[in-house]
Amino acid sequence: MRVGAANLSMGRLLEGHINAVQLIDLYGASPLKSAVRHQILNGAFLGVWGADGEPPLTTGPGDTQLSGGKCFASGLGAVTHAIVTVNSGPQVRLALVEVSDTQRADASAWDMLGMKATASGRYDFTGVPVSSCEWLGGPGDYLKEPYFVGGVWRIAALQIGAAAGLLDCAAARLRAMDRMQAEAQKARLMSVLTRVWAGMALVERAAVAASEPDRSADQIVSTSISARLFTEEVALDAIRAVEQSLGLVHFTGTSETGRRARDLSVYLRQAARDAFLQRAAEVALGQDAALWGVFE
């Protein structure tokens, strides 16, 4: 949460590195774990690139070379090794691939209004030998719970941290303009801040639940989803409140709150929101007393 409050783009890259390390710990062979540990100590930085480009990433004809690429790949030029999804679908595979070839990276493909500091874009894997890939686990392992959707609490942590950072930055700007003493400003921002604190508590509970061995995968997934969705709603409220509090100065090209809000708006737009909500509801509301979830 603290990293998200300070710099959401950096938080996005750090979350990708942490996610990659966890996937290697879960599904990597012992020699690979040791090798990656050594590489990290010597400066390697990891990422997880899951969004397929056009064409999507596959093993290609004959399964000797990769074909296709990844879009929305964060950390181009900074990430040295990426875990990529290969052959999408229920039997999707995970491969750790070196991604330091700058000729394959295209940062111009990122035309979003926010998260520009993530150095995101497209990476073309066409022609990379399959023999150079380090495969993690078996087909479909990537989708196993509670490590797939059950890990979205990390995204929630960045979202709520970024919302807190935005409010803090806005309050500092209002104080500098001698406008923070207005009752309307206090009421507007404080009403959102109380929900930010509630979101922080939910994220922390989801994180703890994910590490509790006696928790069911369904409970972990449901709580992580709930944290992800609730923090999205609060973050949107924070953006709106800051816009109303600062007015036009928020929308100047040099506005720090404006940059933070743009970054947060882009980061919040994760896929399958409605499906996530339905999945959480099936667990929490599908049987008697299940709504207590991880709070029991």
Image (cartoon, rainbow, N blue to C red):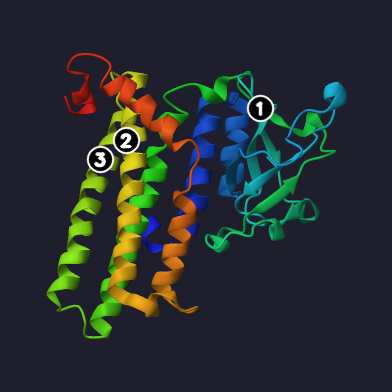
The amino acid at mark 2 is Ser
Q: Are marks 1 and 2 in contact (CB under 8 Å)?
A: no
Q: Are marks 3 and 2 in contact (CB under 8 Å)?
A: yes
212, 224: nearer the viewer: 224
Earlier in the chain: of badge 3 and badge 2, it is: 3
The residue identified by callout 3 is: 202
The residue identified by callout 1 is: 88
Q: CA distance from mark 3 to mark 2?
A: 8 Å
Is 86 situated above or below 184?
above
The residue identified by callout 2 is: 226
Please name which of the two marks, 3 or 2, marks the residue nearer to the observer. 2
Res. 165 visible in picture: no
Q: Which element type, helix, strand or loop, lies under badge 3?
A: helix
Q: Is residue 213 left or right of residue 271?
A: left
Pick out the residue farthest to the left: 183
Is 242 situated above or below 135?
below
31, 27: nearer the viewer: 27
Task: State the count of labels.
Answer: 3
